[in-house]
Image (cartoon, coloured by chain):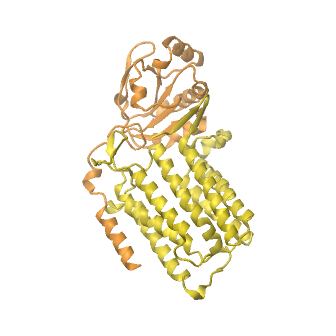
């Protein structure tokens, strides 16, 4: 018994993580919790561009959606409500329309119909959808002020409470 | 990695299906073992099913309690299907506590009941590894090896495969019951001890470890404590004076 525990203790000690590996800056970029959010620059519906890394210092919801996807339509009012309620605390929403499988006209009509006031980014080539490993619509990535993905919700619709629970801790963190 | 399976308008979570399959297989094995150990099979089945339901409900309620205002404003969100709004650790503790209470209330003898659960737990461990593999969870540390897999933008240890292989080996051991003394609780402790030892060993290859002071990996430290408890239990319960029947839960 003592031998087994001794071997286990030695292995635990030998396989500890060196301090240097935790101090090497931001984690690499990947579309997963604990990693840096992959950066992108996209054209916006109505003109202009948005670059994710320029939103560093704010809490960001990246929501991938299409106008024909029923759960995307169902959750958008809750995202809009969360945006309005928390914008002053540092919340930003980037709604990335997967335009490669939608149309700009339909996306514009959808945004107008629901009165969306946050930026609608157009992923015309599908590059951002691919970088974020989009497999199901909608997909939402909750990104903290340092640019790290802290939570991922695949599928929907997200309810107001789910959205609020995902951003509460992030908004409370110091800029 | 295959996190989702699309069936027409439905999006099935493949890891969830793997866990369901493991639960079904595990509970079938537990029922078989309960029969062999002359336990009330209905009580064992109910213990598993109700423990699971209470555990999931507890996990959701614990999550909601952290964000009470949000859920009070929108209580129907408690029923949301998203697994991202669960507190799994607390849910596990609540489920186990409920199962212990349920077993005690229904007169299930502790050690035979634990032995009845042992092979089922082992097979559930396999499905847990498969779920991790399908979802890309419990991923490995970056490594350039002939058997590395490309996941999350890097070549990594296939830690999920290690986990599945270890769980399969533990299942084989649990199925063979090498320690004999059926109903003495030893088979359960063996499964727990081997699982803890496997976690201590394999955690070193993980890329998502929680790190404690001094760079120690939390799962290894906890695994060592569980291993120590299991070894102590094996030593104590293997004593002839303890007898095969044990106390009640």
* Rendering coords of residue A102 (x, y %): 50, 17
- Residue that appears at 36% across and 26% down: A40
Q: Is residue A73 left or right of residue B226?
A: right
* Rendering coords of residue A7 (x, y %): 34, 72
* Rendering coords of residue B172 (x, y %): 51, 64
Q: Nearer the viewer, residue A74 or B105?
A: B105
- Residue that appears at 70% across and 65% down: B102
Q: As displayed, is residue A171 above or below residue B93?
A: above
Residue at the far bottom: name it. B241
* Rendering coords of residue B60 (x, y %): 61, 49
Query: In this figure, what is the number of numbered marks?
Result: 0
Residue at the far front: name it. B176
Q: As displayed, is residue B196 above or below residue A146?
A: below
Quadrant for residue B181, please give it. Answer: bottom right
Q: Is residue A22 left or right of residue A173?
A: left
Q: Nearer the viewer, residue A117 or B44?
A: B44
Q: Quadrant of the C terminus of chain B?
A: bottom right
Q: Could one spot residue A70 in this view of the protein?
A: yes
Give the chain ID for the orange colour.
Answer: A
In this structure image, what is the colour of chain B?
Answer: yellow
Residue at the far top: name it. A105
Quadrant for residue B182, please give it. Answer: bottom right
- Residue that appears at 30% across and 57% down: A17
Q: Quadrant of the N terminus of chain B?
A: top left
- Residue that appears at 70% across and 60% down: B45
Q: Could one spot residue B85 in this view of the protein?
A: no
């Amino acid at each position: 018994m003592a031998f087994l525990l001794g071997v286990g203790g030695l292995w635990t000690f030998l396989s500890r993580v060196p301090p240097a590996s935790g101090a090497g800056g931001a984690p690499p970029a990947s579309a997963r919790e604990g990693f840096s959010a992959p950066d992108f620059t996209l054209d916006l519906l109505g003109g202009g561009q948005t670059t994710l890394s320029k939103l560093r210092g704010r809490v960001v919801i990246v929501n991938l959606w299409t106008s024909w996807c029923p759960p995307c339509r169902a959750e958008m009012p809750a995202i809009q409500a969360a945006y309005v309620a928390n914008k002053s605390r540092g919340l930003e929403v980037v709604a990335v329309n997967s335009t490669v499988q939608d149309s700009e006209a339909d996306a514009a009509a959808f945004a107008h119909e629901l009165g969306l006031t946050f930026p609608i980014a157009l992923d015309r080539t599908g590059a951002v959808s691919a970088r974020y490993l989009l497999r199901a619509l909608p997909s939402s990535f909750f990104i903290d002020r340092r640019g790290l993905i802290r939570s991922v919700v695949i599928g929907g619709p997200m309810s107001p409470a789910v959205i609020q629970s995902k951003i509460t801790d992030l908004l409370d963190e110091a800029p | 990695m295959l996190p989702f399976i699309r069936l027409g308008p439905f999006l099935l979570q493949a890891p969830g299906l793997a866990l369901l399959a493991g639960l079904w297989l595990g509970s079938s094995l537990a029922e078989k073992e309960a029969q062999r150990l002359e336990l009330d099979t209905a009580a064992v089945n109910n213990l598993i099913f109700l423990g699971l339901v209470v555990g999931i409900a507890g996990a959701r309620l614990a999550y909601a309690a952290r964000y009470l205002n949000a859920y009070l404003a929108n209580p129907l969100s408690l029923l949301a299907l998203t697994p991202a709004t669960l507190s799994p650790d607390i849910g596990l503790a609540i489920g186990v506590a409920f199962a212990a209470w349920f077993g005690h209330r229904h007169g299930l003898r502790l050690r035979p009941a634990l032995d009845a659960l042992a092979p089922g737990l082992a097979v559930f461990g396999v499905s847990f590894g498969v779920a991790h593999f399908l979802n890309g969870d419990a991923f490995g540390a970056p490594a350039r090896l002939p058997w590395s897999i490309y996941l999350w933008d890097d070549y990594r240890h296939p830690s999920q495969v290690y986990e599945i292989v270890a769980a399969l080996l533990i299942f084989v051991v649990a199925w063979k019951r090498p320690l004999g003394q059926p109903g003495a609780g030893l088979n359960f402790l063996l499964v727990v001890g081997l699982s803890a030892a496997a976690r201590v060993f394999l955690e070193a290859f993980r890329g998502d470890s929680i790190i404690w002071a001094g760079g120690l990996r939390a799962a290894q430290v906890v695994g060592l404590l569980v291993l120590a408890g299991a070894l102590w239990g094996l030593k104590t319960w293997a004593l002839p004076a303890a007898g095969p029947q044990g106390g009640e839960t």
